[in-house]
Image (tube, rainbow, N blue to C red):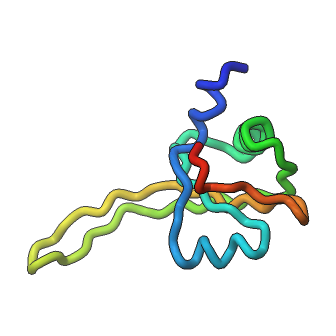
Amino acid sequence: MDKIHLYDKILFPVVTEKSTNLSELNKITFKIPDGANKKNLKKNIEKIFKVNVTKINIINKQNRTKLTRGKKVKVSGYKKAIITLKKGQSIDLTTGI
């Protein structure tokens, strides 16, 4: 498999307060494309970062509308994956993908 294809299933890491707190539990959060599935995602993460993945949870955020300055604005949905790593392993997100 080529390196370009490995990175196709990971768009970017999600860095929020909640995902930072999950990193203490050996969990990393990534935004992924709509066509990604657990099997391919597990293979790609293990090859790219050289870690063992124990569990993957995928969350679909739906499209929604919100009010901004009195106007309705569409917020597009996305798909994210919470990846649980084997105990004692971690991924350093500061080095970049």
Q: Position of residue 37 (x, y in %)?
A: 67, 44
In the figure, 58 relative to 23: above or below?
above
Residue pictured at 60% horizontal, 39% vertical = 9
Residue at the left extreme, as displayed: 70
Measured as percent of width and height from the top left, residue 78 is found at 46, 55
Rendered-image quadrant of the C terminus: top right
Instruction: Specify whether 96 is left or right of 2.
Output: left
The number of callouts visible is 0
Q: Give how far across and how far down residue 30 sits, in percent.
A: 59, 55
Q: Residue furthest right?
A: 87
Please tell me which residue is depicted at 16% across the width and 76% down the height of the picture. 68
Q: Residue furthest front?
A: 95
Left or right position of 77 against 1: left
Q: Nearer the viewer, residue 35 or 43?
A: 43
Q: Residue at x 73, y 66 (%)?
A: 27
Residue sitting at 40 percent across and 58 percent down? 77
